[in-house]
Image (tube, helix red, strand yellow):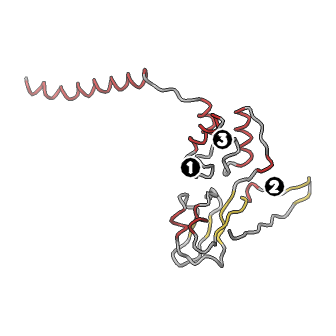
């Protein structure tokens, strides 16, 4: 009889704790700000830090409080800034708009040291030690972490060609020429 009591004690205690946690989750729930949640859902959530905040949720909180401008996210570009401005009900000054950026490695400046590969948290840089490295533009967020660690100043940022306007007038196609400058 005592053995049966011992065998049932653990499941009964676990069920009691589970019930208490379920009750606490329902009745003690802290509601989040729906505006922050809406802005955070729009952000790329790459946690790149280009905006000056450690993550996209912190940037969304700052935008909702009015501490940060809607155009603070460089990877999101102008389209994202317009959506966030519409949600916040503010207008944007697009005079200093800087669109999404992508890293580029200068072939003459790369000696294959591998520091940029180790620094890139998005796996956007490919290559092997003592070999020429390259950047996968679709994976690059333009955070600039690789630019800072390159000992030869062989990496620079330039506007992402996927977001560059290629047509200036209807029917006239502008050729995209990208000039990569060393930092």
Of the numbered discs in the image, which one, if any, rests on residue 139?
none
What residue is drawn where x is 66% and y is 51%?
75
Of the numbered discs in the image, which one, if any, rests on residue 68?
3
Left or right, 177 with respect to 122, comes to right
Q: Which residue is mark 2?
A: 165
Of the numbered discs in the image, which one, if any, rests on residue 47?
1
In the figure, 33 relative to 70: above or below?
A: above
Q: Earlier in the sequence, mark 1 or mark 2?
A: 1
Image quadrant of residue 173?
bottom right
Looking at the image, which is closer to me, 19 or 57?
Answer: 57
What residue is drawn where x is 58% and y is 70%?
150
Q: Earlier in the sequence, mark 2 or mark 3?
A: 3
Q: Quadrant of the C terminus?
A: bottom right
Image quadrant of residue 68?
top right
Furthest-left residue in view?
Answer: 1
- Secondary structure of the residue carrying tag 2 is loop
Left or right, 56 with respect to 5, comes to right
- Secondary structure of the residue carrying tag 3 is loop
């Amino acid at each position: 009889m005592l053995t049966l009591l011992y065998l049932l004690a653990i499941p009964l205690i676990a069920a009691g704790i589970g019930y208490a946690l379920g009750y606490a989750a329902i009745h003690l729930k802290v509601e989040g700000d729906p505006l922050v949640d809406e802005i955070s859902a729009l952000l790329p959530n790459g946690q790149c830090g280009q905006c000056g905040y450690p993550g996209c949720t912190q940037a969304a909180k700052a935008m909702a409080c009015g501490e940060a401008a809607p155009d603070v996210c460089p990877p999101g570009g102008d389209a994202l800034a317009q959506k966030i401005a519409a949600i916040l009900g503010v207008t944007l000054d697009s005079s200093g708009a800087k669109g999404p950026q992508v890293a580029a490695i200068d072939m003459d400046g790369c000696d294959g040291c591998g520091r940029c590969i180790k620094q890139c948290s998005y796996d956007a840089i490919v290559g092997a030690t003592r070999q020429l490295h390259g950047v996968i533009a679709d994976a690059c967020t333009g955070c600039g972490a690789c630019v800072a660690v390159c000992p030869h100043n062989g990496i620079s940022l330039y506007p992402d060609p996927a977001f560059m306007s290629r047509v200036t007038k209807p029917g006239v196609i502008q050729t995209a020429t990208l000039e990569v400058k060393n930092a």
